[in-house]
Amino acid sequence: MCTSSALFILRIIVLLPIRLIQGGIKTFRLGALSGNILVRVFMREALLLCDKTTFKDVLNPLFDMCLSICLGKKSFEVVSYPFKDLQTEALASQTANISTKFYWYCKPDNFDPETDPLIIFSHGGGFAIKAVPTSLFFFRNLSRLYPRTSIVMHDYTVTDMDHDSVRHPRQLLETVALYLHFSTILHYKNITMIGESAGGHLVLSLLHYLETRHLHLPRKVVAVSPWCNPNVCDPEERRKAPCNGSLDSLSFKGLDKFTALLKPSDPIYNADPLLNLETNFTPDTWNAVLKQTQIMVTYGRQEVLKFQIEKFVSKLAQLPSAPANLTVYEDGNGGHIEPFLNFQRNETVWSMQPNIASILKFLEQGP
Ligand SMILES: *[C@@H]1O[C@H](CO)[C@@H](O)[C@H](O)[C@H]1NC(C)=O
Ligand SMILES: *[C@@H]1O[C@H](CO)[C@@H](O)[C@H](O)[C@H]1NC(C)=O
Ligand SMILES: *[C@@H]1O[C@H](CO)[C@@H](O)[C@H](O)[C@H]1NC(C)=O
Ligand SMILES: *[C@@H]1O[C@H](CO)[C@@H](O)[C@H](O)[C@H]1NC(C)=O
Ligand SMILES: *[C@@H]1O[C@H](CO)[C@@H](O)[C@H](O)[C@H]1NC(C)=O
Ligand SMILES: *[C@@H]1O[C@H](CO)[C@@H](O)[C@H](O)[C@H]1NC(C)=O
């Protein structure tokens, strides 16, 4: 463990600056070099220097520590939900009682679960990395704007271990367990799910899961740059990546690492509508979802996931309930999860950034 951490740190010190300069030159040639683009190149190249061991031994313990320092050690809870019909699920043989952990980001005094809104946040990181502490900025600003809103951050099991019990659909079942904990056990009535990247996938597949089991759906869902097809490798999509992916914070190479950890190639999982939301799109289920839940999907024009997200939203947009309950926002200059990479200090200015303003407008709109 120590060797792998030391090697990783060495790689970061020696290789990352070289990669950053190379990446910077590439984007400079495209005439697109800016502070924000450098953050993206940093994220992309840093991820390529990581592997399963560094996720498990270095990054995840570090992010975990940051989160518990920022939010307070005592702000987390572990809840469990007894699933009754797991026979169809891959985890059935192991357990039907799924427990999961979450942090309270904030909970206003006199919070009324009947009317006051609860936001459940699912972080990204390819299902393998824990919540990156910078996502806290987003919620700090959000909680100042909406003082009556409770916010919880889901800390689901990630795929950084070589064991079937941490692979798909573990992350989804934990998301279901957390949602049902609040909605059916504690009777929270006004729940919004927000997820970015892999978390965007989780909040969308949650809807599919709940609808096919006739459970109550959340009021709203925001999927920021959702990874719609985590178990599909589409050569055309790779060929057509905007600017060859050189302007994005994510690369297909990085995604392939995550796919390998999420589920080893297995044809059954390719056909799973809960895993590959776009290629295995089920119109009837999604129309039923849109009759109950308002969905917002946002993505950036410069991100490598653009094509699969566009294909997914165009399938949603054809459904009869879409005009009323589907909102799509394409960020013209945006990369992957751009609204979560905004380090604007002034919350008024923050809330006026077009990609963030579009999310706030969606959160505020009735009914
Ligand atoms: C589920 O597991 C939790 C702890 O992991 C335990 O406290 C709880 O009693 C279990 N519930 C059932 C129904 O087995
Ligand atoms: C849910 O919360 C929102 C504020 O975000 C509020 O506008 C809405 O009226 C609430 N809905 C219900 C059913 O209480
Ligand atoms: C994109 O990358 C491929 C191979 O990596 C290369 O052949 C192609 O010229 C690149 N296209 C652009 C527009 O840079
Ligand atoms: C849109 O969703 C709301 C619930 O948020 C529902 O009452 C309404 O019927 C839906 N509209 C359509 C056209 O399905
Ligand atoms: C809003 O978030 C930014 C980072 O995105 C942070 O620097 C700033 O302090 C936050 N503002 C408030 C008022 O919390
Ligand atoms: C934040 O920005 C607004 C609008 O530009 C400005 O009026 C306000 O004074 C700024 N607040 C701070 C604390 O700088």
Image (tube, grey):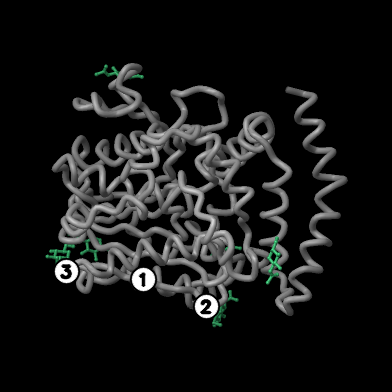
Horizontal and vertical percent position of residue 113: 22, 48
Please state which of residues 188 and 258 is positioned toward the viewer in this rendering. 258
Looking at the image, residue 181 sits to the left or right of residue 259; the answer is: left
Q: Is mark 2 within 8 Å of ligand 3?
A: no
Q: Say what amino acid the circle numbered 3 marks.
A: Pro
Q: Secondary structure at mark 3?
A: loop
- The residue that mark 1 highlights is 328
Q: Residue at x 39, y 58 (%)?
A: 223
Tell me the number on the disc at residue 120. Answer: none
- Depth check, mark 2 against mark 3: the one in front is 3
Q: Say what amino acid the circle numbered 2 marks.
A: Gly
The quarter of the image that holds ligand 2 is bottom left
Give the CA separation, mark 2 to mark 1.
13 Å
- Quadrant occupied by the C terminus: bottom left
| Rendered image quadrant of residue 289 | bottom left
Q: Relative to residue 279, is residue 30 depicted above or below?
A: below
- The residue that mark 2 highlights is 332
- Quadrant occupied by the N terminus: top right
- The residue that mark 3 highlights is 320
- Depth check, mark 1 against mark 3: the one in front is 3
